Amino acid sequence: MSELFDAGMQPERTLLAWRRTCLAIGVGGAAAARYGGTVVGVPAVVAGLLGLALAGAAYLFAARRYRRAHRHLVDRGVLAHDGLPLALLAGALVALAIAGFVTLPGLAQG
């Protein structure tokens, strides 16, 4: 009978995908804070930095999730995971959307 998982490769590929996504959203947050701040001011900076912080937290929690999933697969053969990285990443996207909506009127005027 074959094993239930590919000796750690699937969780590792998932971790790498999470890292790429978090980095891309984090860069978006930094750009929103930098360029939105020059157009709108403080609200865009706050929303951009919030997006950056949430993307960073999702990055860290995704790594923790990977270690736990790998350990559970090796020890028990069962995948255990939570939705915290997904919730943090969703929060980062909401913060970036807010930064975009705050910045858009300033770009149209100037």
Image: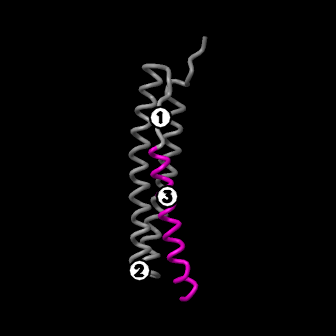
Residue marked by disc 1: 81
Q: Which of pointers 3 and 1 indicates the residue nearer the eye?
A: 1
Residue 84 higher or lower than 53, as above or below: above
Q: Which of pointers 2 and 3 indicates the residue nearer the eye?
A: 2
Instruction: Tell me the residue at 39%/51% (across/down).
Output: 57
Q: Quadrant of residue 3?
A: top right
Q: Quadrant of the N terminus?
A: top right
Instruction: Tell me the residue at 55%/25% (across/down).
Output: 6
Image location (x, y in percent) of residue 40: 45, 81
**Amino acid type of the residue tagged 1 in the rendering:** His
Residue 92 higher or lower than 101, as above or below: above
Q: Magenta residues, as a range?
A: 84-110
**Amino acid type of the residue tagged 3 in the rendering:** Ile
Residue marked by disc 2: 41
Number of labelled discs?
3
The numbered mark at residue 69 is none
